[in-house]
Image (cartoon, rainbow, N blue to C red):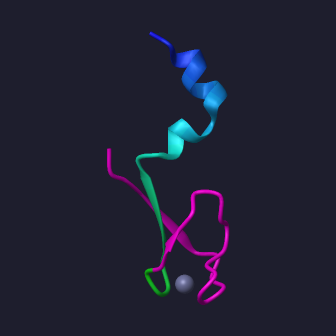
Amino acid sequence: MSLSATVQRGLADNENIVHECRQCGTTLMATEQQCPACESTEIVKFDVS
Ligand SMILES: [Zn+2]
C-alpha cells in the first residue's frame, strides 16, 4: 500500500470526481469553487471511480 504517497500528491484524490455546476451543468475543475459560466457556487460532485 502506498496510501501516504497518494495523499501527498493531493490531486490523486480528485481524479475520479467530476465537479459540475448545479445551475447550468458546466463541468468545473476540482479546484474551482465557483462556476465560471453562471457564477453559481452550488457545485455538485460525482464520484465516477
Ligand atoms: Zn454554472
Which quadrant holds the N terminus? top left
Where does the image place residue 34, in percent across and percent down from the top left? Answer: 66, 74
Seen at 47% across and 79% down, the residue is 26
Where does the image place residue 17, in percent across and percent down from the top left? Answer: 44, 52
Seen at 55% across and 25% down, the residue is 6
- Asked whether, in this view, residue 35 is left or right of residue 27, the answer is right
- Counting every numbered tag in the picture gives 0
Asked whether residue 30 is drawn in magenta, I would say yes
Label the magenta part by its dominant secondary structure.
loop
- Asked whether, in this view, residue 7 is left or right of residue 48, the answer is right
* Between 12 and 41, the one nearer to me in the picture: 12
- Residue positioned most to the top: 1
Asked whether residue 29 is drawn in magenta, I would say yes
Seen at 66% across and 85% down, the residue is 39
* Quadrant assignment for ligand 1: bottom right
Tell me the magenta residue range: 26-49
